[in-house]
Image (tube, rainbow, N blue to C red):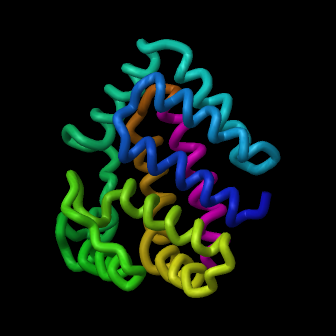
Amino acid sequence: MNNLATLVLAEDIFRRIFLLPIDKSLLASLSSLCAGLEGSSLDNMGQFFSQLSLSDERADEFRWEFNELFLFKPKAIPYESAYFGQGLFSQRCASVRQSYERAGIRRAGGEYADDYVGYELEFLHFLGLKALSCDKVALGARREFISQHCGLWFSQFALNIKAANPSPEWLEFAQLFATYSEILTAQGE
């Protein structure tokens, strides 16, 4: 699997964590998706999600800590604007929205601001799928988005998760996200 295909699959997996309700079923489906990452630097993701999906209790604990880390008095703020000293719905957020619109995407509201990590991952996934189909415009838009947006804050986001002193599961998730971010930033250059 090439780097772009690896990234697109990882984005699909990570976006689901940030956009879908976390439960045992989701974690089991993510474990299955991870089979496509074998042989990559993210190949241990499958085992990670497989372990989490072993019981409802483990899934519940993972979901509860998600809420603690990212929603209720967030310890690792999941919005790009925060990493540039700006508040929610700031100029940085508007710039992200403009990137979506240039690609023909208009978000219809949603629970979060446009610069939410889950939405940025979803956008990268969308552009990546198009790029894998030999769409050079999408590949260019993807590289631009990485260099102007997520490539500038995803690694710090991963560090902030680690610094929040999370459970071993979230610490491992942060490491997986950091590895993904390193590959992403290198691909966007």
Q: Is residue 115 above or below residue 188?
A: above
Residue 92 as seen in the image, left or right of residue 131: left
Q: Nearer the viewer, residue 25 or 69?
A: 25
Looking at the rendered image, the quarter that the N terminus falls into is bottom right
Q: Is residue 181 magenta?
A: yes
Q: Is residue 171 magenta?
A: yes
> In x, y percent, where is residue 76?
34, 47
Q: Residue at x 63, y 85 (%)?
A: 136
Q: Quadrant of residue 57?
A: top left
Secondary structure mainly formed by the magenta segment? helix
Q: Residue at x 53, y 52 (%)?
A: 12
Residue 74 as seen in the image, left or right of residue 21: left
- Identity of the residue furthest to the front in this view: 133
Q: Residue at x 60, y 65 (%)?
A: 184
Q: Nearer the viewer, residue 74 or 7?
A: 7
Residue 169 as seen in the image, left or right of residue 32: left
Q: Point out the stretch of residues depicted in magenta.
A: 170-189
> In x, y percent, where is residue 132?
67, 70
Q: Quadrant of residue 167?
A: top left
Q: Nearer the viewer, residue 29 or 66?
A: 29
> In x, y percent, where is residue 179?
63, 52
